[in-house]
Image (cartoon, rainbow, N blue to C red):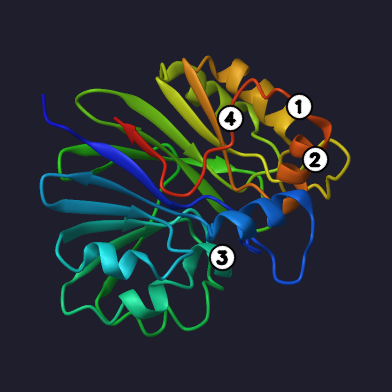
Amino acid sequence: MQKITLKFIGTSDTAGLPVYGCGCAACEMYRKSGRFNSPSCAYIEFQNSVVFIDGGSDEFMKIRENKKQLAQFLTHFHADHAYGLLRLRHSAQSIPCYHPKDENGFADLLTRPHGFRFIENRPFQSIYEAGLEFTPVPLIHTRPTHGYVIKTPNKTIAYLTDCSKIEEQSLDFLRKADLDAAFIDASYDTEYNEGKHLNFNQANELIELMGAREGFLIHQSHYSLSYVLNHKIPLKYPYIPEGFEYNI
């Protein structure tokens, strides 16, 4: 069986961790341990190849230096998910980049693609890259956003960052996917919710509704982590840190 691993470079929201000048419990924990969690960026690694999901961190340039990048998947064009692509587009290699339809894009990525071949997703229509199947799933956020159901020969997972809710058509698709694991946005605590993201209780409920056998929380903020630390909340599903790896 081929080893295929989902690896997270960054799992935080746009502010990262620690937040400059902040003395909250989460920021102090990160500061004292010398750690840094950058905005969303993950990749799938197998053999000597990689497929990236989002690009909220420039760190992925180091990872891909000695590996072949087969494709780029983008959940949406917010800066904390796309700004790393400004540099990546200058690659000498041609890279297909799959994304939701969004005429505004980010900065001048769409008008000056350089090495990227931007390809608009069609919701619920599968994309095949390197023997893996990626299916875009519409999510509710402040601009067009897609999660991805990813099927490998070994497992089926859902990558669902940046959403305030999941409408019934998408939820029904996720239920039928028979998910081994779901990685889902949980930026907010139970006292703070602007309607742009999920809090961890909402994320927990959606993991249950999807029927995923495992659940993991991503896109955490210093607010949500501090709330958990200060109230000593035993989370049913964990917030995963930067550097987390999961075999798929």
Amino acid beneath label 3? Asp
Q: Earlier in the sequence, mark 1 or mark 4?
A: 1
Percent position (x, y) of residue 143? 64, 58
Residue type for callout 4: Pro
> How far apart are the two marked residues, 3 and 2, measured between alpha carbons?
23 Å
Q: Report which residue position mark 1 lands on.
A: 233
Q: In this view, does 164 lie above or below 211?
A: below
* Quadrant hosting residue 167: top right
**Residue 110 position (above or below residue 211):** below
Contact (Cβ within 8 Å) of mark 2 with mark 1: yes
Q: Distance between the residues labelled 3 and 4?
A: 22 Å
Q: Do the residues labelled 1 and 4 touch (CB within 8 Å)?
A: no
Mark 1, other Cα within 10 Å: few <14 / some 14–19 / many ≥20: few
Q: Which residue is pictured at 83% across the width and 32% down the height?
A: 231
User: Does 170 appear above or below 142?
Assistant: above
Q: What element carries label 3?
A: helix
Label 4, residues with CA under 10 Å away: few <14, some 14-19, many ≥20: few
Mark 3 or 2: the one toward you: 2
Residue at 23%, 64% (x, y): give it. 64
Give the position of the N terminus as an image quadrant.
top left
Q: Which amino acid does label 2 sit on?
A: Tyr
- Contact check, label 3 and label 2, Cβ < 8 Å: no
